Image (tube, helix red, strand yellow):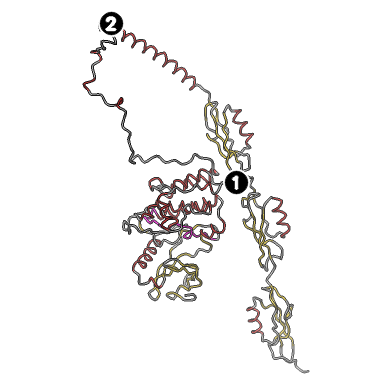
Amino acid sequence: MIGKVLNQRYQVIKRLGSGGMATVYQGLDLEELRFVSLKVLKEQFVHDEAFTRRFQREAEAVSRLSHPNIVRFYGVGKDHGIPYIVMEYVEGETLKEKISRQAPLPVDEAVRIAMEICDALEYAHRHQIVHRDIKPHNVLISTDGKVKVTDFGIAQASSEATITHGTVIGSVHYCSPEQAKGTVVSGQSDLYSLGVVLYEMLTGELPFSGDTPVTVALKHLQEPYPPAYEKNQYIPQSLENVLARALAKDPRQRYQSAAEMRADLAIVLQSGGVIEPPQEYPEDEQATRLLTPLPSEHRAVNASEFQPADEFQPDDESAPSSVPKRRLRWWMSLALVMLTAVLVVAGWMALDRLQAKWNVPEVVTPNVVGLPEDEAVRLLKNAGLEVERFEVENEGMSPHHVVRQDPPGDLKVKVNRTVRIWVNTGPASLTLPSLAGRTRQEAVAELENLGLSYSLEEEYSHRVPKGEIIRHDPPSQSTVIPGRTTVKLVVSAGPEMLTMIDLRGLSLKEAETRLLEKELSLGRVYTQPSDEQKGTVLRQFPYEPGQPVPIGSEVDLWVSSGRPEED
C-alpha cells in the first residue's frame, strides 16, 4: 500500500496504525498539496455488509461535524472496490501514548484536555451524534497541544433506536454501564467514558480492571470506582466531585450535557482546586422500601371512639361526678386567657431580640485573596470578622498565601460574621527563564540555583554551536515548581560529520551530484589550465578526501579549462 496513489489523488506515504476494521495511513493530497489521514477498510471486510455499513456510518457521522476539537473530514472514495475516508492529518500523539509516557498528568493539564473533549462532545451531541467509543486511543494531541477527537467508527445518531441488545459496543474498559448491558445509549454514555479517561489521566490507572472483558463490564455495572485521590494526593475534592458525577451508574445522576461538565471543570481550574464537600446524591424517591408497621398505640381510632368536647364524661373513678359542667368551662376559659397572655409576652420578647439582631452593624469584607495569611487574618479581625482557616495545595500561588475566601471581598456582612479562607500549603512556583543559546554549564547552574532537576539530551545541529542549548522542555515562561519539575535540556552536539569523498577526476556535473547525495553543497568553482579534459575536477577545498566534514558544508572546486594555449 505504501507508495500507492488512490484514485490518482492521494499518495500513501506511511502506515500510522491499525484498528479492528481499518488501517490508517499518512497520505499526501496531490491536488491540495497537504498531508491527510487515509482510513482504509481492511480487504477482508470489503464484502462484509456489517463492516461496510459501519464504515459508511463513520463517514456520514464525521461529514456532519466541523469543530476545532474534532478531526476534520475531507471526503470519501473507493479504489478498486476498497472504501476509504480522507481526514485531517494531526501531527502529534494519541492521548493514550501521552498517558503511558507521562501519567499521572498535572491536574491543570488533565482538566484542560477534558474540557476540550467536552467541547467536541457538546458539538457532536447537539448534532445528534453519540460517539460511543471515547477512550484515550481516540483522542489526538497535536504538537502544539491541541486536542482532537477522532474515530467515530461506532458513532450513531442519538435519534436511532436500533441496537443489538446484549451486545457491548465500545471498549470495555471505558464503556458505560448501559453499554455494558447492551441497551440504548445517549450522550451521558460518552460523559461516563470521558470520566474514565479523566480518571486515567489523573492516576495513570483505570478505575476498573479484570482478567476478562466480562469481569470488567460487571464492575462498571456493580462496583463503585476507587476514589482518584487515593492514588494521587494532588487531586482536589472539587475535581473528585466531577469524577463522582461523571462516573455515576445511573445516567440520570450524571451530567446532563457536556457543557455542564465543562463548566464544573472550568471552576476547578479557576479556583485552583479549592476544598469542597464530597458529592452526595439523594436516594431515588421511586426506589422500593420496606415499611415497618406502626405500633398498636399509634393505630387509627374508630370514629365511634371520639366524643365531642362539650360532652366530656370523666370516668367514675378519676373525677367526682358532682363537678358542675359550668364551673369546668369557667376554668377552661381562664386557662385559655392566661395562655394567650404568656404567648403575647413571649412573642414580644422574641421580636425584641430579633430587632436587636437585625440592628447589628454591617461591614465590608476585605478582599484578602493573594495576601499572606498573617496579613489576611489581621485585616479580617480588624474589620470585626471571625476567621475559619482551611488548607489547600495550589501550585499557581506562593505558599502561605490566601487562595480563596468565602464570602468574597467587597461584600456587606454583619459584624462577627465568620469568613472562611483557604491558605496555600503547596510549594512555591516560579517562571522558567529562557535557556536557549546558553552553554550547557550555564543552563545547568541556573536550574540548580532555581532548585529544578534536569535531564540532558544531545542533538546534531549545524546552526547552534556545539555545547549550547538548542531548546528545553518545558519552554521559557512556563510555570515550574522546585523539587517537582524536571527540565529537559537539548544540547547541540554540533553538526553531524561525514567523511569527505574524492571528487577529483569527476566532471563538474558528476561532482555536484555526489555532493548533493552527501548533503553537501557546491561552493565556488574556479578554472585553471591543465592537461586534463576540460570540465574535469582537479582539486577540492577546504576538505580533502577522507577528512571529516560537517553536513551542509560548501566545497569549492577547481576545474580544468583545458590545455594551455602555446605562444
Q: CA distance from mark 2 to mark 1?
A: 81 Å
Range covered by the magenta-colored residues? 125-142
Q: Where is mark 2, residue-wise?
A: 327
* Local SS, label 1: loop
| Mark 2 vs mark 1: in front | 2
Taking depth in this image into account, of 320 and 202 the one nearest to the observer is 320
* Local SS, label 2: helix
Q: Is residue 333 above or below residue 547?
A: above
Q: Residues within 10 Å of mark 1 (few under 14, many from 20)?
A: many
Q: Residues within 10 Å of mark 2 (few under 14, many from 20)?
A: few
Q: How many marks?
A: 2
Are the residues tagged 2 and 1 within 8 Å (C-beta)?
no
In what quadrant of the picture does the C terminus appear?
bottom right
Q: Where is mark 1, residue-wise?
A: 395
Residue positioned most to the right: 567
Taking depth in this image into account, of 72 and 52 the one nearest to the observer is 52
Q: Is residue 68 visible?
A: no
Q: Residue at x 68, y 71 (%)?
A: 496
Q: Pinpoint residue 276: horizontal percent, then vertical percent.
A: 51, 40
Q: Pinpoint residue 448: horizontal percent, then vertical percent.
A: 71, 52
Q: Which mark is residue 560?
A: none
Q: Pinpoint residue 182: horizontal percent, then vertical percent.
A: 35, 56
Q: Amino acid at mark 2?
A: Arg
Taking depth in this image into account, of 225 and 334 the one nearest to the observer is 225
Picture quarter containing residue 514?
bottom right
131 inside magenta stretch: yes
